[in-house]
Image (cartoon, rainbow, N blue to C red):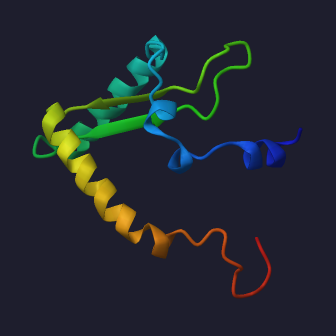
Amino acid sequence: MNRRERRAKRKLARDATPAEIFPADHGPVQSGLVDLMKATIDALREHLGSNFDVTLFVAERAPPADEPRLPRFNYISTACREDMLAVLEAFAAKNRQAATKLDKINDEPPTGVRQ
């Protein structure tokens, strides 16, 4: 199976249920990833200043071949959890309304030639 066939077969997050995205039996975040995420947050806060909170989401495309598990989804945030959730809910609601206008990937391009 080539890369294009794997991509076509892969279920997109927008088509998944919350239970598929956040399975109950998920594993802990990888320690190397925690360090990288913390360093990224620290660098962003250093450049943005203390007036901003930062939330970083990291989604694994696929688990390593030798690990029989679902891909992991991790986040780290400097905001309090309740504020982060409120902003995410507002973001999702706004983008759900615009999704039909923005999601044109399956439409035939005006030139008739896909890139």
Residue 40 as seen in the image, left or right of residue 103: left
Residue lying at the far bottom of the rendered structure = 110
The x, y position of residue 48, in whole percent, is 21, 46
Residue lying at the far right of the rendered structure = 1
The x, y position of residue 89, in whole percent, is 25, 49
The x, y position of residue 28, in whole percent, is 44, 12
**Viewer-proximal residue, 49 or 16?**
16
**Viewer-proximal residue, 81 or 9?**
9
Residue visible at 16% across and 45% down? 52
Against 89, residue 55 (above or below) is above
Against 45, residue 109 (above or below) is below
**Viewer-proximal residue, 65 or 13?**
13
For the image, the number of numbered tags is 0
Against 15, residue 74 (above or below) is above
Residue visible at 24% across and 44% down? 47
Q: Quadrant of the N terminus?
A: top right
Q: State which quadrant residue 45 falls in.
A: top left
Q: Quadrant of the C terminus?
A: bottom right
Residue visible at 46% across and 21% down? 33
Residue 44 as seen in the image, left or right of residue 51: right
Q: State which quadrant residue 18 falls in.
A: top left
Against 58, residue 5 (above or below) is below
The x, y position of residue 68, in whole percent, is 67, 14
Residue 71 as seen in the image, left or right of residue 58: right
Residue visible at 39% across and 18% down? 35
